[in-house]
Image: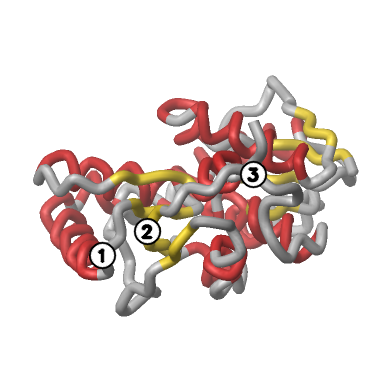
């Protein structure tokens, strides 16, 4: 199957390695990955901020670049949700490409039930998974945890109040910094109590927010995108 990777703005600006990992994972699952180099933003920041007039031309460009029927895969629940839910509000009647979050695509579209497809390296690590809020809109549930639970050598530890927000909230973290940081620290308290060494998530916004708080308070935790966890489990 040919798929198109929508890298997302945060991966492009701060974590290109996540895009590389996503390509490795999709190829290991049997996909041919195309990367439209003309892609920019899906319009979500302006959309979430209420500036729909500014968001519309950005969204239209995204739809022009990703026109067609080949699936679009994004390593981000929020960007996938923007295409599937936000576009219809922003541009009523517009046709959107079939768009999926990375793990959602692996499990629900490709039928991947365990990872890796071939035996990879074992390395026992204690990981806690943080669910991004936009995953609720896509009805992802515990999809990520179930797949991570099949990775050899990986110990997925439970976290209290797993649906709790990290406080990022896009522009909210910039306009309401103290409140955002307070929510993030409460989330980190629960993640640390789990005994995890690493925090994984499927959304770069959450990871960047939590990583900033971890570094500021010297909490000694590693943050990693789930695409990187899956890629690290593949044979070299």
Q: Of helix, strand and loop, which one carries label 3?
A: loop
Which mark is in front, 2 or 3?
3
Residue 36 in percent (x, y) is at: 74, 26
Q: Residue 146 location in percent, x, y?
A: 59, 70
Give the residue displayed 25% in from the left and 48% down from the top.
221
Left or right side of 226 for 183: left
Q: Is residue 190 above or below residue 172?
A: below
- SS class, disc 1: loop
Q: Are marks 2 and 1 in contact (CB under 8 Å)?
A: yes
Residue 41 in sight: yes
Tags 2 and 3 touching, CB below 8 Å:
no
The residues tagged by marks 1 and 3 sit, at their Cα atoms, a distance apart of 25 Å
Q: Image check: 115 left or right of 205? A: right
Q: Which mark is residue 120?
A: 3
Disc 2 from disc 1: Cα separation: 7 Å
**Mark 2 = which residue?**
126
Disc nearer the start of the sequence (2/3): 3
The mark nearer the N terminus, 1 or 3, is 3
* Quadrant (top left, top right, bottom left, bottom right) of the C terminus: top right
Q: Nearer the viewer, residue 183 or 122?
A: 122
Q: Is residue 233 above or below residue 41?
A: below
Q: Which residue is mark 1?
A: 195
């Amino acid at each position: 199957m040919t798929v198109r990777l929508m890298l997302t703005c945060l991966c492009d600006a701060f974590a290109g390695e996540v895009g590389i990992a996503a390509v490795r994972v999709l190829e290991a699952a049997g996909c041919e990955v195309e990367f439209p180099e003309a892609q920019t933003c899906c319009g979500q920041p302006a959309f979430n901020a209420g500036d729909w007039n500014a968001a519309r031309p950005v969204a239209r460009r995204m739809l022009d670049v990703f026109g067609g029927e080949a699936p679009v895969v994004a390593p981000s629940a929020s960007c996938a949700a923007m295409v599937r839910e936000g576009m219809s509000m922003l541009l009523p009647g517009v046709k959107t490409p079939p768009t999926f979050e990375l793990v959602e695509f692996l499990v629900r579209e490709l039928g991947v039930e365990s990872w890796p497809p071939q035996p990879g390296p074992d390395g026992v690590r204690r990981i806690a998974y943080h669910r991004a809020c936009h995953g609720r809109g896509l009805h992802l549930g515990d999809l990520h945890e179930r797949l991570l639970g099949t990775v050899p050598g990986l110990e997925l530890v439970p976290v209290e109040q797993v649906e709790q927000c990290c406080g990022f909230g896009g522009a909210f973290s910039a306009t309401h910094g103290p409140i955002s940081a307070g929510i993030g620290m409460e989330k980190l308290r629960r993640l640390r109590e789990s005994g995890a060494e690493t925090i994984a998530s499927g959304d770069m916004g959450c990871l960047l927010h939590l990583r900033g708080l971890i570094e500021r308070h010297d909490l000694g935790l590693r943050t990693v995108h789930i695409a990187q966890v899956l890629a690290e489990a593949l044979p070299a």
